[in-house]
Amino acid sequence: MRKLVASTFVSLDGVMQAPGGPEEDPTGGFAYGGWMFNYADEAMDLSRSGFDGKDRELVLGRRTYEIFEAYWPYQPADDPIARTLNAARKHVASRTLKKLHWENSILLGADVVGAVTALKAEPGFDLQIIGSGNLIQSLQAASLIDEYHVWSFPVVLGRGKRLFEATAKPGALRLVSTRTSVTGVVMSTYVPAGDIRPGSFAQTEPSAKELARRKKMANGMW
């Protein structure tokens, strides 16, 4: 079965809206579009987290698809990211689009969860979500995301669309790897790790085994 990987840029307070530019997504009066720009450095290898779509099939929400479709097909042919994104197969979740103009693009249909479940069962490259916050919400709630590549930027935005909204399905994550750029961007990879296991630091009564251990220690001291 193919993995479904979600890659996204987030602020320290979890906002993922419009990292690339002011016009990217001003929904809700968001005024900080382009907030990641000044943190870029050479340590940020886009291919390492699948942001360039190399050897992946993309799964995109409508807004992310439209942003990409308006830009990447028109970049120079020798641009490595443009080359891989244009060549990748792109599965697009949309209730409004009827026709897709970017090469190798396919509509997922009304049942996005069912369509992605079917895609994961097919042979081929792993599936890659880039951005696409609403789509991440739906697929995370259905437990379909196998890996998260989250780049956390040292900036607080206060408002905007978040990676995990109030509708997110509770669950534990395990940190697989992490790196830090010169500008302080923490690039981390997580995988789901089952249910949350609550505990408490409040003092509890010691077990019989613990009481016996303490008694043995006390006898040995005297």
Image (spheres, grey):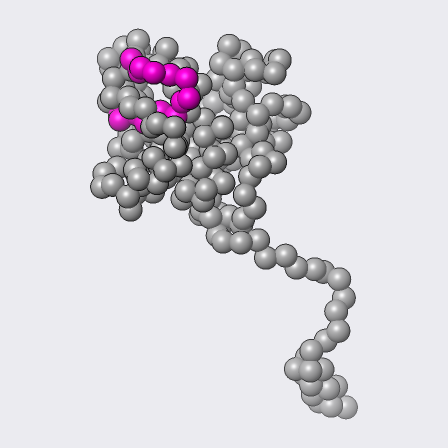
In the image, 18: left or right of 62?
A: right
For residue 95: magenta?
A: yes
Q: Nearer the viewer, residue 172 or 120?
A: 120
Q: Is the magenta region chiefly helix, strand or loop? A: loop
> Is 131 displayed left or right of 17 in the figure?
left
Report whether 85 appears left or right of 21. Answer: left
Question: Residue 2: which quarter of the image?
Answer: top left
Q: Quadrant of residue 29?
A: top right
Q: Does the magenta stretch include residue 128?
A: no
Percent position (x, y) of residue 221?
74, 87
Whole-percent x, y for residue 182 in the image: 50, 30
Q: Which of 207 and 40 is in front in this view?
A: 207
Q: Can residue 179 be seen in this view?
A: no
Q: What residue is at 47 percent from the left and 35 percent from the top? A: 138
**Which residues make up the magenta segment?**
88-101
**Residue 194: percent from left, percent from top:** 49, 53
Q: Going by the picture, which residue comes out furthest to the front?
A: 110
